[in-house]
Amino acid sequence: MKKLINSPETVVTDALEGVAAAHPSLSVDVENKVITRAGGPQPGKVGLVSGGGAGHEPLHGGFVGYGMLDAACPGEVFTSPVPDQMLLATKAVNGGAGVLHIVKNYTGDVLNFQMAAELAEDDGIEVVPVVINDDVAVQDSLYTAGRRGTGATVFVEKIAGAVAEDGADLTAVAAVAREVNERSRSFGIALSSCIVPAAGKPTFELGEAEVELGIGIHGEPGRTRAALTPARELAVVALDAIRADMPVGGDLLVMVNGMGGTPLIELYLMFNEVRKYLAAHGGNVVRNLVGNYITSLEMQGFSVTVCQLTDALTRLWDAPVDTPALRWGR
Amino acid sequence: MDAEVFRAWIVSAAGVIETNRDHLTQLDAAIGDADHGINLARGFTAVLGALDAAETKAATPGAILTLTGNTLISKVGGASGPLYGTAFRRAGKALGGAADVDLAALSAALDAALAGVQQLGAAREGDKTMVDALAPATRAFSKAITAGASPDDALSVLVEAATAGATATISMQALKGRASYLGPRSVGHEDPGAVSTALILGALRDAAQAGR
């Protein structure tokens, strides 16, 4: 294993100290692993809290700031944070209008956020959870824990953050968050595994000429394994899976996301294939993100997330945002 | 069984989890996200620290298990933190303030732990989870006690049923947790949560036998 670390045990806290040093707009409680906007809660504004395992940077800490999250709590690498962290974050951002918990649909995240919400309610803070489950690689059925939360999380955090900044109440912010989740679908493909620092070796082995289709964001194996093919064919695999579940006509917000170890030149190439496919199926990509937004350590590969926009959602997407990883209009 | 036995159980559990840290992580790598052993080892290390710090406060079997559960919830994260944390908390609550615990009370506490896990995680037997070790174990334990088994025999039955339950998960398709994303590809692998459950119950047997 070759990594730029001091020791596997201190990866998360060492990185948080770097985040604190790099971004004076953030207030970082390194010991408790809670990132909040500097300046404390805003009276009357709904607070937005998200969290999840570390290793997906810039998610979630890189999205704390004006127009997006109020707080993020990273767990250990690929491990959900604990209720204590989430409770601290919830208290820190409560401006009296309640707090939205944005939870990716993994058993650990859901259970820990559920416990944190109960603790916060004991303290008189109203909490509404919204569970993100956009990954079509997982069948949503009685036979699984349900779809995983992946790329749509970025869209939900941005758009719900914009609504909250406009002064909407908790019910309205939660409704928009759910709407974005329901209108979004994702699919990911890996070219290589990632290496969890504490494990020290690749989570899975892939042959030179193989790809893993339907990969999650934790190095968990995907739907199936296939031969590596040209990018345009991989785009078809990903978008066929999305289109089988949701129409892709009309105005779309599309993210082509790198898993951490993919050069931007390949992501732009893939974005072009994605755009062409969608255009051929009546989709008009009016907004996009191309880059590393929800990663899986050093994994090579990409995920594509498609969101059906409405005029209102487009306006909210365009609203000013000022975070370490997403910044425009301000 | 007094507080010393329960303290010895937790110390022994921490030891066996540390010894099997890489094995549990490898099992998890096959069908999950390769951190089960790492997270449980981190959690039990924190539990040992908490028990040392609370030497006088955690003076009863129930208090020791409750402190263990609270610490696991606060330190582990993932799904195993809340699930194991709830299991130990419920067991601790069921034991109440008793200074000495007999087999029947222990059996009731393990039943409470199972109920807590199932309530939180909504898993049933056959879903390829820790329930597949814990449920047959508590059932066999209770049956052995009713049949008048000695403490040694009843605890051996408990551990054998848990271990057999864990082995039986190999042929199951996961219906809960991260392994369920694999669908049929989860078949052929032993569930790491079921294996760690069998290890922790094995530590209970060892501590109880050493304590007499």
Image (spheres, coloured by chain):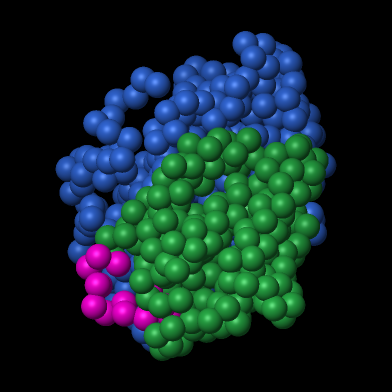
* Percent of width and height locating residue A8: 33, 35
Give the magenta-colored segment's residue range. Answer: B51-64
Query: Which quarter of the figure has residue B76?
Result: bottom left
Q: Measuring 52% from the left and 76% from the top, which residue is drawn there?
A: B91
Q: Residue A282 lies in magenta, yes or no?
A: no
Query: Which quarter of the figure has residue A218?
Result: top right
* Percent of width and height locating residue B165: 71, 55
Is residue A14 positioned above or below A68 on the image?
A: above
Chain letter tied to green: B
Q: Measuring 64% from the left and 29% from the top, which residue is drawn there?
A: A189
Q: Is residue A309 in sight in this rendering?
A: no
In the image, taking residue B160 as reference, residue A159 lies left or right, namely left
Image label count: 0
Among all residues in the image, which is located at the extreme bottom? B97
* Percent of width and height locating residue A307: 64, 47
Is residue B204 positioned above or below B55 on the image?
A: above
Q: Is residue A323 in sight in this rendering?
A: yes
In the image, B173 versus B61, the foreground residue is B61
In the image, B136 versus B143, the foreground residue is B143
Chain letter tied to blue: A
* Percent of width and height locating residue B163: 66, 52
On-image quarter of the N terminus of chain A:
top left
In the image, taking residue B145 as reference, residue A127 lies left or right, namely left
Q: Measuring 31% from the left and 77% from the top, which residue is drawn there?
A: B58
Q: Residue B60 lies in magenta, yes or no?
A: yes
Q: Measuring 62% from the left and 72% from the top, which residue is drawn there?
A: B150
Among all residues in the image, which is located at the extreme top? A208
In the image, taking residue A253 as reference, residue A52 lies left or right, namely left
Is residue A81 positioned above or below A224 on the image?
A: below
In the image, A164 versus B116, the foreground residue is B116
Query: Which quarter of the figure has residue A23?
Result: top left
